[in-house]
Image (spheres, rainbow, N blue to C red):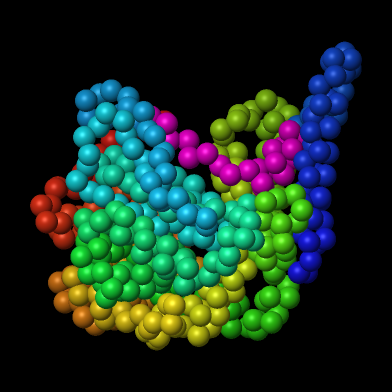
């Protein structure tokens, strides 16, 4: 599984299915078929359209789609996505609302590097851009990064976060979603030790596996069942000749997507069959619910092999973060060094990926932080996705996070609980 031929074989299968879909759609559009009252032609066109779009999206990075924002003055303002820090494996980007006064809340939204692009947090960004300056870690697809750029493991990830925090300054409020929560906690602690004046003002950890063994799930059980040798042999491949990262060892996004789809094969199969029916009946649209969901869900990215393997080994198996034994560049990071950064954890009561108890473990690690600087919240009825997107996030969690930020600000501004979001 480590060779380029395997990676290229998966890409060939994907490319072939995209071509078959395009061929069926194009063939069904021939003018001569319009004279034939055969519903099979419509079904062929519908199958081709859905199939082509499905396999095309697997290698396309989604657009943020945040172009304008309606401010309090009632006018639409353009939103420019600017790169403020550029690095080989990921950039720091800023959603700059043109013509609007700079907002007092500056938020660094740490996106996961877990197989999907940072655009997975699109709705989170839209909800925060209302009255915050929003910055996001935009991780790159490993297949597009030349081997000459070197390795990228969880220590490098931690150092990247420290650089981003330094750039944004001490008035920053960091919000880490899911997978990066442990490393964001470590980056904050390391920064508190090395450069106290650069540490952020607040740190909010949402649904992250700080201590995976606190409440085991299928995800943590999988990490226990397999050995690192098995994981490397079955999951790691070399990027094929089609991309700039040719030869780089990665955990392929297509392989991860196949695993995701197989877990709920019946549900996904029904969703695509129903979409074909809707397309054949002219009931579908480019931005209907099916396309909005799967355009993002199917867009996967390759992860650097060393990042994937070190995450499983050191975060889940060895529990270095949970045991406060995490090392970065030969230096032991002590979470107790966090003494003035207010820390809040958010969990969902029905989260089956990072179950309640895993994230709140961060508060026990922050031994140097006074109790008034710690907070936690468990959202009733919310699953993993719901704690950073959807109604639970918009109606309950977002206001609580903004209240927490304001309560720990030098000059707190009242959080806007009923802010109207009108983002195109």
Tell me which residue sits at (43%, 35%) in the image: 66
Q: Which of 133 and 271 is in front in this view?
A: 133
Magenta residues, as a range?
Answer: 47-68
Q: Does residue 30 belong to the magenta stretch?
A: no
Residue 25 position (above or below residue 210): above
The quarter of the rendered structure image containing the C terminus is top left
**Residue 18 image position (x, y, % from top left):** 77, 41
**Residue 60 image position (x, y, % from top left):** 63, 43
Residue 209 in which image quadrant: bottom left
> Is 37 situated left or right of 378 in this image?
right
**Residue 247 image position (x, y, % from top left):** 72, 62
Tell me which residue sits at (28%, 36%) in the image: 420
Q: How many marks?
A: 0
Residue 126 position (above or below residue 76): below
> Is 363 situated left or right of 270 in this image?
left
Q: Does residue 52 belong to the magenta stretch?
A: yes
Residue 114 position (above or below residue 182): above
Which residue, as the protein is rendered here, is positioned at the far front? 148
Tell me which residue sits at (67%, 25%) in the image: 282
Tell me which residue sits at (39%, 34%) in the image: 80
> Is 65 situated left or right of 366 in this image?
right
């Amino acid at each position: 599984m480590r060779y380029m031929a395997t990676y290229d074989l998966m890409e060939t299968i994907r490319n072939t299915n995209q071509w078959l879909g395009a061929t069926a759609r194009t063939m069904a559009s021939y003018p001569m078929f319009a004279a034939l009252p055969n519903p099979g032609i419509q079904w062929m066109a519908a199958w081709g359209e859905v199939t082509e779009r499905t396999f095309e999206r697997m290698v396309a990075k989604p657009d943020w789609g945040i172009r304008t924002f309606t401010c309090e003055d009632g006018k639409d303002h353009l939103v420019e996505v600017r790169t403020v820090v550029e690095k080989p494996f990921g950039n720091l980007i800023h959603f700059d609302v043109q013509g609007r006064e700079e907002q007092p809340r500056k938020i660094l939204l740490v996106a996961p590097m877990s197989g999907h692009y940072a655009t997975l947090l699109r709705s989170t960004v839209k909800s925060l851009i209302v009255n915050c300056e929003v910055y996001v870690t935009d991780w790159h697809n490993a297949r597009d990064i030349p081997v000459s750029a070197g390795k990228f493991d969880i220590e490098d990830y931690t150092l990247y976060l420290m650089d981003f925090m330094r750039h944004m300054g001490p008035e920053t409020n960091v919000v880490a979603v899911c997978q990066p929560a442990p490393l964001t906690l470590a980056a904050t602690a390391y920064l508190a030790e090395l450069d106290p004046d650069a540490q952020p003002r607040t740190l909010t950890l949402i649904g992250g596996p700080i201590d995976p063994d606190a409440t085991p799930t299928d995800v943590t059980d999988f990490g226990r069942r397999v050995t690192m040798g098995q994981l490397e042999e079955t999951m790691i491949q070399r990027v094929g000749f089609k991309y700039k990262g040719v030869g780089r060892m990665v955990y392929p996004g297509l392989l991860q997507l196949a695993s995701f789809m197989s877990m709920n094969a019946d549900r996904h199969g029904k969703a695509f069959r129903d979409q074909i029916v809707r397309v054949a009946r002219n009931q579908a649209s480019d931005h209907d619910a099916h396309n909005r969901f799967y355009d993002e869900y199917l867009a996967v990215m390759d992860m650097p092999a060393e990042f994937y393997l070190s995450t499983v080994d050191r975060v889940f198996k060895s529990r270095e973060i949970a045991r406060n034994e995490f090392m970065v560049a030969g230096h032991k990071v002590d979470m107790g060094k966090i003494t003035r950064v207010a820390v809040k954890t958010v969990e969902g009561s029905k989260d089956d990926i990072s179950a309640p108890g895993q994230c709140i473990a961060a508060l026990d690690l922050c031994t140097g932080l006074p109790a008034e600087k710690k907070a936690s919240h468990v959202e009733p009825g919310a699953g993993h996705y719901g704690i950073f997107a959807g109604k639970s996030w918009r109606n309950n969690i977002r206001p609580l996070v903004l209240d927490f930020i304001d309560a720990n600000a030098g000059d707190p501004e009242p959080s806007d609980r009923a802010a109207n979001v009108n983002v195109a």
